[in-house]
Every structure is written in structure tokens, then in C-alpha cells.
Image: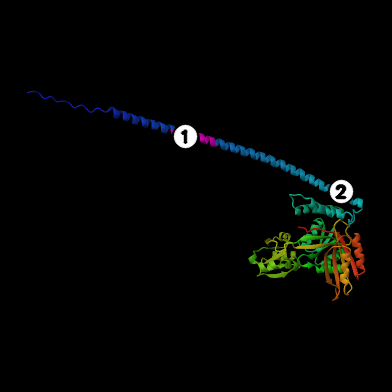
Amino acid sequence: MAKRTSKKKKPPIESNTAKSSTAKSNTAKSNTAKSNTAKSNTAKSSTAKSSTAKSSTAKSSTAKSNLSAAVDEVAIRKILQRLEKLDRDILAKCNRRVGMTKDLAELHGEVHSARLGKLRPAMDGAVHSAVERNEGPLDEVAVRSVFRELISGCREQLVSCRVAFLGPSHSYSYLAAVERFGQSADFIPVGTIAAVFSEVEQRNADFGLVPLENSTDGRIADTLDMFTRISVKISSEVPLRIHHQLIGNLTRAEIRQVCSKPQALSQCRNWIAQHLPQADVVETSSTAAAAKMAAENEQVAAVASRQAAANFGLKIVARNIEDNPRNITRFAVIGLEPAERTRDDKTSLLFQLPHQPGALAGAMAVFRRGRLNLTWIESFPKPGSQNEYFFFVELQGHYEDQRVRRAVDSLKKKTERLEVLGSYPRRDPIV
């Protein structure tokens, strides 16, 4: 019987393909790991480089900023030094102007004269000329203020100038007086227009300043009446733009009273009626007195100037409340001496006509024949008479002009009383 031969099973042999796949997989993992490591290293390197770059940029910016600040500091110091030198030059020239003004006064023999007759037009005209020649960037108000105070200081070096005005301080009359004479003048506040005339007549003041007319309310009757009573001369005019402010320490809704001088209230009556119908209107002796009342009572508002608000520590509740945006009060400067002739003058006349038919027409014909332009005419009753009137007339030209003098001589023949109140330079409204 034949033997059965048993065959041993051989263990399975791994496929070369499988080994190859495993090797490739391991290689891929290894390469991926390396790649990730490389990317990580690259990223770290980039981050490091970026941080380094940012740090360098920041340092560079800081350095530039410091350099720029240092350059600015140097530039600022240089400008300040130049400004200081310029200020010294301006001061030196101002003092030189005072010296030259004194020299001019000595040549005219007016060093100790309150009149300063021949010198005054040049001094007064200097402010006007400066405003006319100004090309900016300073505005008219600033230029006028600078030269006004310079001329005021020059005048004070020659003779003390005393000016009476309808007080108190910070009223519109005060502002007009400062505008005309500057802060160096010796101001005398009085309580009435009549007192201003009296101060001048008694020589307690060299000049007086009185309101003449307002563009809203017309003539100032008290002033015209005093011209009929006291003999003085008009030496100049101050047409001042009047801007009324509503001032107080309250809101508009809290206002129970509005107070001011009658003329100021009249010039704002439409605005007050429209915006403050709930408020009582109270008259005071002056706008400055009204401002004082507003400072003492938190339910009271005043109609006054911006300067009055600043002086009494009040805020401006509403600005420029005048009904007429071109509101102008014209003030007259009065004294005992006439003004010198200029190239652009006005002449004021006061006369009384006989009470008979055609008297006024005959007087007006004199000006027409003389080709004289009348700029203002007012009539007002003669005190103590029902049917007689005084006439106040302004015309273009100076009394020394031949045409004006001839007209005045002709007018004398037609009047019962005639006075030349003065010839003086025409002035444009002051802002």
C-alpha cells in the first residue's frame, strides 16, 4: 500500500505591491511631515521677519515723528522770534509817530492848545485813511480800532481831551464817544442831553457827544431843542451802526420782562412782539441801566449792546434783534470851536422863518438856486408857540465854499433867525 505523503502549508508571502504601497505611504507621511515642518518653520520665519519689519517700521516712524517734531519746534521758535522783533519794530514806530505829531504841533503852535485846530483834521483823517488803504487780512473793525487808539494816544500826549456824553458807560453814546476819541480820552458821563450841552458851554468838557438822528425813529428832539438854546458848534459826526442784543442770565422761555431805553425798545418792537409776547416791556434811562437790571434779576432780559453784556457778565440770548438791519444812529460831536475844512464836508444850519405864506418855499429856493444838495431837513415847534417852527438843515459843502456862503447870505434875508451850527467832515457809517 503506498504511503500518503502530507504536504506542509507555506506561510502566505506578502505581496511586493503591498510593501511598495506601505513604503510609499510612509514616505508620503514622512514628506508631509517634513513639508508641514518646513511650512511651519517658514511661517515662523516669516512671522519673525514680519515682526522685525514692523518693529523696524515703527522705529522708523517714531524717528521720523521725533524728527518732524524737532523741525516744527525749531520753526515755531524762529517764527516767535520774528514776531517778537516785529512787535518791537511796531512799538518803536508808534513812539516815533508820537514824536512826529509833537513836532507838527509845535510848528502849528498848538502843543498846549485844547483846540488842535489845524492838526485835528490830519489826526482824525489818519484813521479813515488807514481803513481805506487796508488790503487785509485784518478787517475794517480791527484796523479802525488799532489806529483809533494810536491817534488817541498821540492826542493825549499833546493835551488832555475831556468828552461829555450821555451816560452811563457802555451805553451807545459811550461806544460812539470811544469810537471817535479812543480810550485815552477823559470821559465825563452825564444824565441828560441838556447836561452834555451845559458841560461844553461851561468849558467843563472840550467836546460833547449827542445823538442827532436814528434811521428808524428819526430826529432826536431833545438834541435839536438844545441847539436852539445853547450856542455850540458841530465839529464832526459819528454815524454808528446799532446792533441790539437781547441779553440776560436766562433762557428765552424764562423771560418775564424786557427792559431798555425807549428808543432801543422802539427799534426792536416788532421782534419783541413776535418772539416775546408773554413779556412785559419796561422803559429805563439807558441801555446800560437795563443791562444792570438784567444782571440783578434772573427773570429780566435787557436790550443793549454786546459790550454791555460783557461788562455785566450776561449772555446773549438773541443776536441783532433790531427790526431794521441797517439801523444807524448818527451822533454829533459838539464844541466851542469850528472844524477845519476838508475835501468832503457837510454844513448844518438852524433857522426860523416868519409865519407867513410861502416862507418855506422861498427858503428852499435859495438852496436850489445855489445848486446845493440838502442831505437832511427837520422841522420842530418853537418852544412856547403853536404855529412857529425851527428848521434844521444839512447840506453838502463847507461854509467857506463860495456857493455855500452865498446861499447863507441870501437865506439871512428871508429868516428871523439863522445860525451856522458848523461845517464838518462827512463820515461813512461805522460797523
Segment colored magenta: 39-54
Picture coordinates of residue 138 (x, y %)?
74, 50
Estimate the x, y position of residue 16 in percent, counting from the top left: 28, 27
In the image, residue 72 above or below residue 221: above
The residue positioned 65% from the left and 65% from the top of the image is 252
Q: Is residue 44 magenta?
A: yes
Badge 1: residue crowd in 10 Å (few <14, some 14–19, many ≥20): few
Numbered label tally:
2
Q: Is residue 34 above or below residue 359?
A: above
- Residue 25 sits above or below residue 257 on the image: above
Q: Is residue 263 visible?
A: yes
Q: Return the residue at label 1.
A: 44
Secondary structure category for the residue under label 1: helix
Q: Estimate the x, y position of residue 411 in percent, counting from the top left.
A: 90, 67
**Residue 229 is at least partly visible in this image:** no
Query: Dot 2 corresponds to which residue?
Result: 100
User: Quarter-wise, where is residue 406 in the image?
Assistant: bottom right
> Seen in the image, is 51 located left or right of residue 85?
left
Quadrant holding the C terminus: bottom right
**Viewer-proximal residue among 336 and 241:** 241
From mark 1 to mark 2, how far is it between C-alphas? 82 Å
Dot 1 amino acid type: Lys
Which is the main secondary structure of the residues drawn in magenta? helix
* Location of residue 207 in the rendering, given as x and y in whole percent from the top left corner: 85, 61
